[in-house]
Every structure is written in C-alpha cells, then in structure tokens.
Amino acid sequence: MGIIERKEKQREEIKKMILEASMQLFVKEGFENVSIRKIADLIEYSPTTLYIYFKDKNEILFHLCEMGFERMIAYNLSLIQIENPIDRLYVLGENYINFGLENPEYYDLMFIQNAPMKTVREQNVGHWPNGDMALETLKHIIQECMDKTLIPKGDVATISMAVWAVAHGLVSLAIRQRLERLVEPDKVVQTMHDSIRWMINTLKKA
Amino acid sequence: MGIIERKEKQREEIKKMILEASMQLFVKEGFENVSIRKIADLIEYSPTTLYIYFKDKNEILFHLCEMGFERMIAYNLSLIQIENPIDRLYVLGENYINFGLENPEYYDLMFIQNAPMKTVREQNVGHWPNGDMALETLKHIIQECMDKTLIPKGDVATISMAVWAVAHGLVSLAIRQRLERLVEPDKVVQTMHDSIRWMINTLKKA
DNA sequence: CAAATATAATGAACAGCGTTAACTAATCTA
DNA sequence: TAGATTAGTTAACGCTGTTCATTATATTTG
C-alpha cells in the first residue's frame, strides 16, 4: 500500500521544513535565538506541532549539529589530494581553525554545547556518525605519520587527543573571547595559526 | 561621618550574602540552576532586591567566576616550591586538569561561558584580575624554561597559547563529554594525563 | 456509504526565566 | 517636624520549553 509510504514522505518533508527553518534562524540570528516558538512562527505552524516530529529541542539541535559537520567536511575535501600525511595534518589544523572562526555558531553546537550530546546519548548505542568520522580522520593521519616515521612513535589515541585538544582549545578559547587576555586582540588569529604550526613543528622535530 | 560608612558596610554585607547564596546554589545544584529567583528565595529577599546590589545576573556570575579562580590558585600553592620550571610546568598541567575535572561547574564559568566576560568587557578597561594573573603565571614559567634552555627558544605568547590550548582543550572536551568518542569512557582521564605529559615531553625533546 | 478509528494539528496552560516600572516603607538631612 | 533619599516590594512584561485536552481531518473497517 503506497498510502503509508506517501504519508512517510510527507512526514519527512515537514521534518525537513522544520530543520531548514531552524538553520535559517540559526545562521541569521545565532544559537541563542533559535526557539521552538520562532521556528514554528517561521513555518507557520503552532509550537506544539514540532513535538510531533521531534522529541524535544535537543533533537533539533542535534540535527543542526550534524549539518555543521557536513559543512566542516566541505572544508576538508581537498585533503585527499595531499600525499604527505604531515602536510595533511598541517592543512587539517588550519582548516579546523578556519572553520571554527568562520562558523562560530556551528562550532559551538558541535563541540561546546551539551544539548546535542544529550540526544546522542539517548539514541541507540549513542550514534554520532559525522562526529565519529571526523575523529577517525585525525587518528588515521596520525597513524600514517607514525608509520612513515615522520613523527616519533607513540600511542595514537594519546597523540590524537593532544592534537585535537590544541586545535579545539585554540578555537574554543577564541570564540569565547579568552585569548584576548593573552595577546592583543588584533593578533589573536595570527597567533592561533602560529600556535598550531608550532605544535606540529615541535611534534615533527621531537 | 561614620553613618555613611556603616551604610557602605551593610551594603557590602548584603552583597556578600547574595554571592554566598549564589555559590551555595552553584555548587549544590549546578550552573543551570542558579537563577535570580532561587537566590532571592534562599536569602529571603524579593528578586528585585538583587538588582539594587548587582547590575544583572552576569555580574553575579562574574563574581562566582572570580571565586573559581581563587579556588584554582589554591591548587597551585605548592608550585613555588618547585625549582625546575619544567617540573613546575608538568605540575601546573596536572593541576589544571585536576581542577577542571573536580570543579567542572567552576571551570565552565571561568573558561567556557560567555556571561562573565560580558561583565569584564563592560567594566572599566575590562578588569579581570584573577584571570589575567593565571595567564601571567603560565607565560612566566615558559619564559623561565626558555631562559634555562630547557625548551627551544621561540615566541612566548605563541608557545603559552599552545600549552594553554592543550590543557583547556582536554578539560573542556572532557566536561562536554566529547572525549568519550575518542577513547573508552573509563580511559578518558588517564589518556588526558598522558596527553598533557606527552605534550610537555615533546616540547622538551624538540 | 456510514461509523469507527487513527493521525495531524491546535489553544490554553504550567512552571519557569531575567528584568523593569511604579509604589510603599523606612531612614537620614535640613 | 517636613522633605528628600534609600531600601525593598508587588505586579507585570515578554520570553522560554513542554504537556494536556480538544478539535479537525483523513483513513480504515463493518
């Protein structure tokens, strides 16, 4: 019976409408201005309707978060062309910082806010496809660097964690305006790039 | 005239009452449960009264943030006894992670939330005594390490930023439950410590 | 085809939030 | 003692996420 199929399709379409309206609000007015009521207003439904299609606000934010990861993946499309894994690591770091600075709202949702992880945890076995994939990419590059003895051997998880931590530390401190206390405001971005490069340089020489 | 002096003292005492009630709520029920109304309830005043003593909620959070820094300073009292600056750096890193994991709510306020920085920016020339002091400590240690050629020479701000970024990255990813995607949950804390040690080791060898 | 059922959508409400304006009560000054 | 200053309160505004009971609209069954 094609009727229930069509119904399912309609459901998916309304879900899409809701998410697109959320994203529109999100990019235009920022994370704090995404409210159930404003989304409902935009698509001209009542606020209660959203709860027919999503469990709660966290679930909507989770999907916005996934969109953020897709956006981030777009930043890294050129990576595959780079043969030398350590060069790939440099570019990955640069891209990470650029993505964070250019999309602070998305970055916030993806790596700082609690809300999306609440949904991840509630889901079956905590499925977080895009998030996990990004981490695998990093681990893979580190592993390749070690295999080709471009960096000293060591525990991949430990080193990956440290590298991710530098990048995330820089971006999250920057978008929360903490780095301006360390260097003059107009030098923050430059110093961030210097930092991540210095980090990988150091790693290479060690 | 001692009368206006006594008034000032009373004002200060009520301010203290408000902050202590806030802190009590903060440590017992967490950041999200600190509301103007709950604080007012606790000290048996009306919510509007708080606005006589503080400009807004951000200003209260700023003071809680300062209390957090004092707590953090207590973690580092033993540092002055350590002669070798690189050993001091190791311990500073360990302390930073321990502080963050043991006081996630304070850490959040100090380094993640926007609210306290809003007050800092509104204040005259953005005074943030405790925050700035902590950063000076770090820069000073790095400088000392370079002076004694324990680590390669370089730009102090750049290196300080990188070191802070690793530490902050680890703690903030941990308290936002992102590290569980990289290593098994029960290994997160151990790997964090490994990471920061590995980072300083690498820096030493470079 | 009509009655019963399932689904979609809504209005009203709950309980909370930060904040402000207008007002009362208490205290200090002239 | 009258007037001015200060402390504190009540009531309200405009938000927030979320739920319950109700209506309207399809779809399925007798």
Image (spheres, coloured by chain):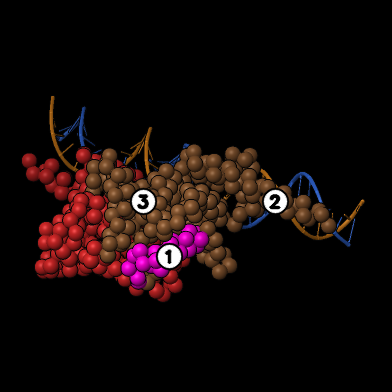
Chain colours: A red, B brown, C blue, D orange
Region rendered in magenta: B131-154
Q: Which mark is residue B9?
A: none
Residues behind callouts 1 and 2 on a single chain: yes
Please tell me whether residue B54 is drawn above or below residue A101 in the rendered image.
Answer: above
Percent x, y of residue B2: 82, 54
Q: Secondary structure at mark 3?
A: helix
Please tell me whether residue B45 is drawn above or below residue A148 in the rendered image.
Answer: above
Instruction: Please name the residue shown 55% across and 56% down the image.
Output: B59
**In the rendered image, which residue does mark 1 sit on?**
B144
The answer to whether one can see residue A98 in this image is no
Which one is earlier in the sequence, the residue at label 3 or at label 1? 1
Q: Chief secondary structure of the magenta span?
A: helix
Which one is earlier in the sequence, the residue at label 2 or at label 3? 2
In-front residue for pair A55/A123: A123
Instruction: Please name the residue shown 15% across and 56% down the image.
Output: A143
A86 magenta-colored: no
**In the rendered image, which residue does mark 3 sit on?**
B171
Q: Residues within 10 Å of mark 3 (few under 14, many from 20)?
A: many
Proximity of marks 3 and 1: CB atoms separated by less than 8 Å = no
What amino acid is at disc 2? Arg
What amino acid is at disc 1? Glu
Report which quarter residue A88 is drawn in: bottom left
Percent x, y of residue A9: 15, 49
The nearer-to-camera label among 1 and 2 is: 1
Residues behind callouts 3 and 1 on a single chain: yes
Q: Give the spatial CA distance, label 2 vs label 3.
A: 37 Å
